[in-house]
Amino acid sequence: MVDEGTRKTLSNIPLLTTKAGPRDKELWIQRLKEEYQSLIKYVQNNKSADNDWFRLESNKEGTKWFGKCWYIHDLLKYEFAVEFDIPVTYPVTAPEIALPELDGKTAKMYRGGKICLSDHFKPLWARNVPKFGIGHAMALGLGPWLAVEIPDLISKGVVSYKEKANS
Amino acid sequence: MTTIEELQAKIAELEAKLSAQNATARNKIDSMSAEVVDSNPYSRLMALKRMGIVDNYENIRLYTCAVVGVGGVGSVTAEMLTRCGIGKLILFDYDKVELANMNRLFFQPHQSGMSKVEAAAQTLRNINPDVEIVTYNYNITTTDNFQHFMDTISTGNLTNGPVDLVLSCVDNFEARYTINTACNELNIKWFESGVAENAVSGHIQFIVPGETACFACAPPLIVASNIDEKTLKRDGVCAASLPTTMGIVAGFLVQNTLKYLLQFGEVTHYLGYSALNDFFPTMRMKPNPNCEDRYCRKRQEEYAAKPKPVKEENVAKTEEKPLHEENEWGISLVDESATPEEVPKSVAEGLSYAYEEGPKVLRDEANPQDDVNLDELMAQMKSM
């Protein structure tokens, strides 16, 4: 279902406990704190495993998220802007992660550059409400997507290396 | 170089074309007539009354439907309702028309680049100017738009009340769940519809808050497509689609919408369609008393408290005379509708859940984190 590496990564991301979405006012603030704590730990894990691959931040309300992710291929770093909204029905429904600059460049995307997730993602997410958060969506959704799609897009010449992306 | 004369000729030609187009568009019609003349767009619909199918066809003008998602299913749904002379349609979608949509019905290549709702409204108003059409070009699942969506469906009908039905023609779980949340909260009946990503199965489901299972009561249902999962290739694509399957599902959806609004026949609670073997499972699902949606649970309590009307037997109207006087071969019909209220474990033949449910975790109020400050966490994350 999920490969061993992803499973291990997942198990090291702190689980969340508050079941609240953006319409839940105070409880949402609580959830948001948990989201940030979980994400901070996940990024720290990535750094110490020498596998740092994304940064995210949100608006004040925690409803809009944006940042960047990158993928190393043949020692070159390919960087992409990431964005997504927290749906009103979160965390029952997962955020739809988008890479707008790749919109229209691959069939493995829905409109607006939303990545096409595997059949496994939704069942796994549904069974882990409210424990899974944004970090889990990144690890389970975007991570594997980049690993499959970016090398393919590079080999097709759709994505090419940009010198200044190396910051 | 083009001369002025040539340009003038071109203008004249275009003006003639335009006026020819405008001439074919008809004016509004005040009331539906049953008169059978070539010029009456409603004669064949009003004939349903004479045939004894519908008692009150002209009442269709009193009703309002919201169509959420104006894609392969939603656009055809909107067109059917427009041709049927519905009172008002409210369309929601945030997508644009693309050439990649041309394998489906309704939209035309010259509309590429337009928003789907705008392109649809243009065509629909031309087909039937009697229908009031309102469009919203946004994504209903985001916090910014959700409240507006709720306000619109709760005050959008012809007398500023709630819409009579919401028709979900969206292509993703998030939007379905959003519609479910809104309709449970507002107590609005809705139809869910869907076509599988492999294009060979689809379904419609009638959701009456508190009375039938809502979208959150159980994991989504899958119509068995009789394909071995291992042979189903997904390499390099997200979804396939066929105009046939989408047209069929839109037909089921609107047929049941008409039956509900105009009160004829029986409204099917769940109707599946498996294209590969032409199998049409139907069933009825009771709401889950432990549904995660608290408004669903609230509607269930309200429904339980409501006195149930005793179901009138439909025998009065039908003639009792046996259809076939002789029955040489002893053929008889077996009643298969014996226990429609029961939900079997396997849901129904040819239907299964998309996945097994996980343990339900209700709102967890423990774990207070008042010691941590959100701004500090945000700053910490930003500085990493």
Image (tube, rainbow, N blue to C red):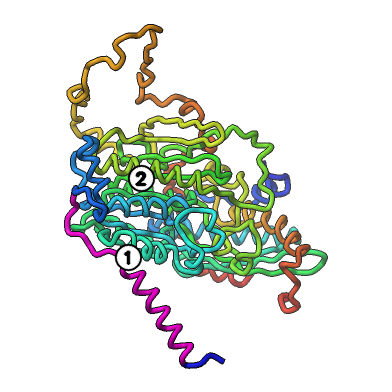
- Residue B239 at x, y = what percent? 58, 50
Q: Which residue is mark 1?
A: B24
Instruction: Give the numbered dot on residue A113.
Output: none
Determine whether label 1 and label 2 are within 8 Å by CB: no
The residue shown at (74%, 71%) is A160
Residue B313 percent across, percent down from the top left: 21, 23
Q: Which residues are magenta?
A: B5-33
Does dot 1 land on a helix, a strand or a loop? helix
> Can see residue A117?
yes
**Could you tell whether A75 is left or right of B304 in the image?**
right
Residue A15 as seen in the image, left or right of residue B256: right
Query: Which residue is at 18% across, 51% downward?
Result: B33
Q: Quadrant of the C terminus of chain B?
A: bottom right
**Residue B15 sits inside the magenta stretch:** yes
Name the quadrant of the N terminus of chain B.
bottom right
Q: Residue at x 45, y 30 (%)?
A: B281
Q: What is the three-letter code of the residue carrying label 1?
A: Thr
B210 vs B17, nearest the viewer? B17
Identify the chain of the residue marked 2, using the numbered disc in the image.
B
Task: From this view, report whether residue A99 is shown above or below residue B15.
Answer: above
Disc 2 is placed on an element classified as helix
Q: Tell me how far mark 1 sits from mark 2, CA to CA.
A: 27 Å
- Figure check: B279 above or below B127: above
Q: Nearer the viewer, residue B223 or A7?
A: B223
Residue A70: horizontal and vertical position, in percent? 69, 66
The kind of residue on which mark 2 rests is Val
Residue A43 image offset from top left, x and y in percent: 65, 61
Closest to the camera, between mark 1 and mark 2, is 1
